[in-house]
Amino acid sequence: MTNTATDTVDAAKAAATAKETLSFQTEVKQLLQLMIHSLYSNKEIFLRELISNASDAADKLRFESVTQPALLGEDADLKVRVTVDREARTLTIADNGIGMSREDVIANIGTIARSGTREFFKSLTGDQAKDAHLIGQFGVGFYSAFIVADRVTLITRRAGLAANEAVRWESDGAGEFTLEAVEKPTRGTEVTLHLKSGDDDFLDDWRVKSVIRKYSDHIQIPVLMKGDGEAATEEAVNRASALWTRPRNDISADQYEEFYKHVAHDWESPLTWVHAKVEGKQEYTQLLYIPGRAPFDLFDRDRKHGVKLYVRRVFIMEDAEQLLPRYLRFVKGVVDSNDLPLNVSREILQESRDVDTIRAGCTKKALGMLEELAQSDNAANKEKFATFWKHFGRVFKEGIAEDTANRDRIAKLCRFVSTASEGDAQDTGFADYIARMKPGQDKLYYVTADTLAAARNSPHLEVFKKKGVEVLLLAEPVDEWWLGMLEEFEGKKLASVAKGDLDLGALADESEKKAQDAISDELKPLIEKMQTALGERVKAVRVTHRLTESPACLVVDENELSGNLERLLKAAGQKVDRAAPTLEINPDHPLVRRLESEIKGDSEDARFADWALVLFDQALLAEGGQLDDPAGFVKRLNSLILSSR
């Protein structure tokens, strides 16, 4: 090696071992300030977070050691060790898990590499009580140490690296941290908290042990502390067994909830859970939870979703999305299989029949949890289901389109706003709607729109309001998707109030039909002239019986794209060739009568055309559409207003 090359290598080694001071990411600084000002109402939660991190590190080492047994070496007994030093006023949490390299430390502690970060900070209100829950929901893990510590020291060595490649990280939480290379004879991570004055209770062994038993009893590896007396040996504070392997009768509700907070990295308790052991051709255990709140990045397509997969209690992967369909991506928990190979990969999961069986079983259990809440007469369960729908309804409705095998079960669980709802409450299911249907009604009517206000005020609802017929108000983008897959529910056809030639069936009045036919004949000259004036903008012009207050509305054929779906597709960058709509006019409206008088008089064709175009543009605006020529619309409208004075 040349002198120049040697000098370069030496310089690189020196840079890697030198102590350097770095700044936290801006979002981390904000988060640390919130921590330091004690937004957590329950300080002891920091211990749960740090022990959970240690447990995760052990899980990751187990997984990597399946293909690299040398990583475990002679230290295969994974554990967490908690040490109290009263004189130094420190509390140390150490593990012999996977550990971190220098790059890992910078990436995992110096930044928040998590989608939804910006939305999280926008959601902070300044109210400490509310913000505490938001922080817990965001999942801060390591940063919770600063709740009780004014300085935190971390020493870590990744499995497989040499003793001199360990890293020492330290910060007082003020915005900067130091990094330097140190010697560490064993792999793993130890976090030392230099406790603030006033937090002396965490220097008491009994107090620390009680917190560990409260929050971390379910951790699979032993959490060790010294017993009483000078010569006391270490003893496990927790049970050190996988919670899901225990009999259900031996697990309390509090233990289930604490395990959820560990596995989901969530602050709040879950809404409900199911714990079952399946035996037969496939043997596996499932412990699945419905969270109490949606994460910020639920709709982020790049975010990984899914439950944790274990094989014979050995952790395999963090987000095995193959075990549940995407519309259930909010479900958290673990699945532990006795049959899958330990070296299972994502590719194998995608092609495995065994996994298909587990997926079907988990889906069945998840839907069963929700059905139990929805069908319960218990007020608390009803409130839980309402909470579920508020946070996850938009995602859950994707299942109508995606999961043909469970489509009917999913549809029964869906809830909507309807014209019979109180305010904007999504409290109407298909079964509720059918129970309230008018005698002779054979269809479930709905309207789609960009917003709930637009749906509620759609002119297409006017005849339904007049007859007291309920209509579902669908204003979420996903609604247009699943509507294309669900044609009927329990024998009742779903019908859009804005599509086709409206057939009210037995709800229609024969005298009204005859009157409509008569008025259509009477207005035939007006209809023909309007169609000529509007040209290719419309497929046809006809008299309507949908309207009682508005002058006109736009209608598409039964199998054509709705105006709302067309706008959604265009917003997504897709090219849409939409057929021209039909313009339906209300013969009793003064504007339509004004148009009729225009053709009976000696009005110029240009002014008639302006009236027809204004009527068309108004109908387009009423359904949430965009005008091709807004300035032209304003000009025509102003001209007609002035000429009518």
Image (spheres, rainbow, N blue to C red):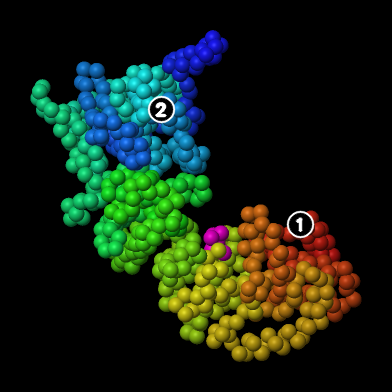
* Predominant SS of the magenta segment: helix
Bin the neighbour count of mark 1 within 10 Å (Cα to Cα): few under 14, some 14-19, many 20 and up. Answer: few
Residue at coordinates 51% horizontally, 46% vertically from top-left?
A: 302
- Which residue was labeled with disc 1? 630
Residue 388: % across, % down: 39, 57
Mark yes or no: residue 588 visible.
no
Mark yes or no: residue 39 visible.
yes
Question: Is residue 301 rendered to the left or right of residue 79?
Answer: right
Looking at the image, which is closer to me, 297 or 623?
297
Residue at coordinates 76% horizontally, 57% vertically from top-left?
A: 630
Residue at coordinates 81% horizontally, 82% vertically from top-left?
A: 525
Asked whether residue 478 is drawn in magenta, I would say yes
Bin the neighbour count of mark 2 within 10 Å (Cα to Cα): few under 14, some 14-19, many 20 and up. Answer: some
Q: Earlier in the sequence, mark 1 or mark 2?
A: 2
Magenta-colored span:
475-480
- Which residue was labeled with disc 2? 101
Q: Give the answer, above or below, for where 66 lies relative to 616.
A: above
